């Protein structure tokens, strides 16, 4: 990936110099979008500068002030901000709870011409997975648009890291699949994958696409190289899960509270921010890099008993 970025910088330069719709689109961008669509098993994809801007582009383009967004209460900040920008009515449902989602849709769906249901795929702080198959069944019943932010599922879930839609075998059933290239891919950038009509609509209405400079050529080339690695072999993804199983089992054996995570994201619940900071410093002194995360990034919790 480093070599690909270096070669792209020599060939194309460092910055894109313009937005995609003026002079910022390079053959690398088009190639990456084609490859990401193929990787995700959809017909089309559009890239953005980050996963955050992908959500800021997609949500306001799909719904407006007369519509409603049904959002998991623990969704990422970019989903919250994108929802606010849309002007739509925001209705939260209980975390990973399709029953509560259905209750909210049953009570409110008839009041809005369009309804957009949004969930993270893998939740970044707790490491749990949205029950996307059950959520899809509810959205289909109430004719709602379904959007999943798979930022932490790409490179982790599904065949060779293809993500949560592949994990649940929901190809062709999720309207918008948002992702980021800054997590498992290790570069930077965002993507929205789905039906060609949705992607074309975002090319016309996605404000970060229209009014902010394109992904840089080195970053785009690095992402393409990352795709090559994931498509060539499942070795990296397999090793990730082997390491995850070992780490979780050993942390539990040592008596740590690691929550309800079922993914490589493994929170170590210490209960107090000062204790977490001290823990992080002592780990660093022993060549282990693990950052302390406290309120408001995560909710305040009580220390584990015992």
Image (spheres, rainbow, N blue to C red):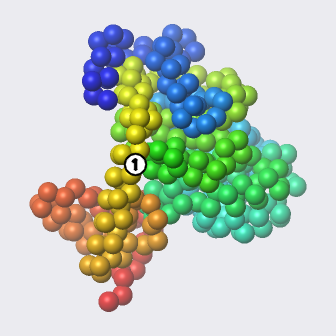
Point out residue 103 in the picture as x, y percentages from the top left corner.
78, 67
For disc 1, the neighbor class at 10 Å (few under 14, some 14 to 19, many from 20) is: some
Relative height, residue 212 to residue 39 (above, below)? above
Residue in front for this viewpoint, 151 or 21: 151
**Element under disc 1:** helix
Q: Examine the rendering and report whether any part of residue 281 can be seen.
A: no
Point out residue 67 in the picture as x, y percentages from the top left corner.
78, 46
Write the residue at 30% across / 73% down. Answer: 251
Q: Is residue 32 left or right of residue 146?
A: left
- Find residue 279 and report its image quarter: bottom left
Which image quarter holds the C terminus? bottom left
Residue in front for this viewpoint, 42 or 143: 42
Q: Residue furthest bottom?
A: 306
Write the residue at 67% across / 49% down. Answer: 170
Q: Residue furthest left?
A: 285
Point out residue 55 in the picture as x, y percentages from the top left corner.
57, 40
Q: Examine the rendering and report whether any part of residue 227 can be seen.
A: yes
- Give the tally of numbered discs: 1
- Find residue 106 and report its image quarter: bottom right
Write the residue at 85% across / 45% down. Answer: 113
Point out residue 9 in the picture as x, y percentages from the top left corner.
31, 16
Which image quarter holds the N terminus? top left
Relative height, residue 176 to residue 90 (above, below)? above
Residue in front for this viewpoint, 253 or 297: 253
**Where is mark 1, residue-wise?**
237
Write the residue at 80% across / 45% down. Answer: 114
Q: Residue furthest right?
A: 110
Relative height, residue 119 to residue 294 (above, below)? above
Q: Is residue 15 left or right of residue 108?
A: left
């Amino acid at each position: 990936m480093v070599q690909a970025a270096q070669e792209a910088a020599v060939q194309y330069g460092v910055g894109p110099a313009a937005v995609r719709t003026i002079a910022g689109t390079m053959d690398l961008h088009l190639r990456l979008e084609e490859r990401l669509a193929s990787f995700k098993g959809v017909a089309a994809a559009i890239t953005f500068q980050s996963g955050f801007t992908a959500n800021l582009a997609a949500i306001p383009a799909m719904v407006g002030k007369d519509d409603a967004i049904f959002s998991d209460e623990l969704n990422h900040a970019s989903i919250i901000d994108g929802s606010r920008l849309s002007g739509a009515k925001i209705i939260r449902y209980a975390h990973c709870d399709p029953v509560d989602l259905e209750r909210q849709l049953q009570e409110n769906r008839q009041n809005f011409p369009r309804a957009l249901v949004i969930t993270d795929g893998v939740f970044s702080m707790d490491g749990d997975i949205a029950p996307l198959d059950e959520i899809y069944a509810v959205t289909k019943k109430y004719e709602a648009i379904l959007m999943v932010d798979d930022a932490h599922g790409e490179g982790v879930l599904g065949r060779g890291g293809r993500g949560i839609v592949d994990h649940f075998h929901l190809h062709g059933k999720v309207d918008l699949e948002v992702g980021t290239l800054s997590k498992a891919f290790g570069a930077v950038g965002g993507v929205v994958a789905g039906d060609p009509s949705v992607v074309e609509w975002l090319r016309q209405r996605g404000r970060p696409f229209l009014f902010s400079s394109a992904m840089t050529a080195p970053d785009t080339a690095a992402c393409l190289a990352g795709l090559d690695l994931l498509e060539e072999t499942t070795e990296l993804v397999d090793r990730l899960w082997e390491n995850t199983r070992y780490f979780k089992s050993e942390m539990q054996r040592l008596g740590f509270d690691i929550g309800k995570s079922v993914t490589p994201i493994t929170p170590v619940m210490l209960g107090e921010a000062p204790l977490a900071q001290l823990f992080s410093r002592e780990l660093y002194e022993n060549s282990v890099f693990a950052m302390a995360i406290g309120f408001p990034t995560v909710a305040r919790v009580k220390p584990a008993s015992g």
